Amino acid sequence: MIIQEKKATKTILTDILLAVKWSHISTHYFGKSRSWFSQRLNGYDGNNSETDFSNTEKELLKNSLFDLSERIRKC
């Protein structure tokens, strides 16, 4: 599942937005702050400029969700 360019990342993740602790994803998998992740998820950075995850970051997000799902299955 590579996140499509035309659809906002947040829209694609709507079904799981409240179920996932995004601060953990941002720090554990990206090594970034919660605000950095939130800015990309919401499409705007701290200067109110449009922003998004890069294709590499989208792939990392996908893999982090796969990893998290595997960890949940093992529990």
Image (tube, rainbow, N blue to C red):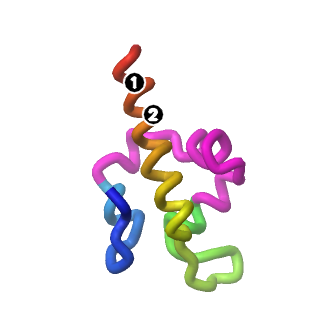
Seen as rendered, the residue at the extreme bottom is 49
Residue 68 disc label: 2
Residue 20 disc label: none
Describe the element under mark 1 as helix, strand or loop. helix
User: What span is in magenta?
Assistant: 15-37
**Does residue 44 appear left or right of residue 6 in this picture?**
right
Per the picture, the main secondary structure of the magenta-coloured stretch is: helix
Q: Position of residue 65 (x, y in %)?
A: 43, 42
Q: Residue at x 66, y 59 (%)?
A: 35
Describe the element under mark 2 as helix, strand or loop. helix
Q: Residue at x 33, y 65 (%)?
A: 11
Toward which corner of the image does residue 1 lie, by quadrant?
Answer: bottom left
Q: Position of residue 55 (x, y in %)?
A: 50, 68
Image: 28 above or below 53: above
Q: Is residue 13 magenta?
A: no
Q: Position of residue 70 (x, y in %)?
A: 39, 28
The answer for how far apart the CA atoms under marks 1 and 2 are is 6 Å
Image: 40 above or below 14: below
- Residue under circle 1? 72
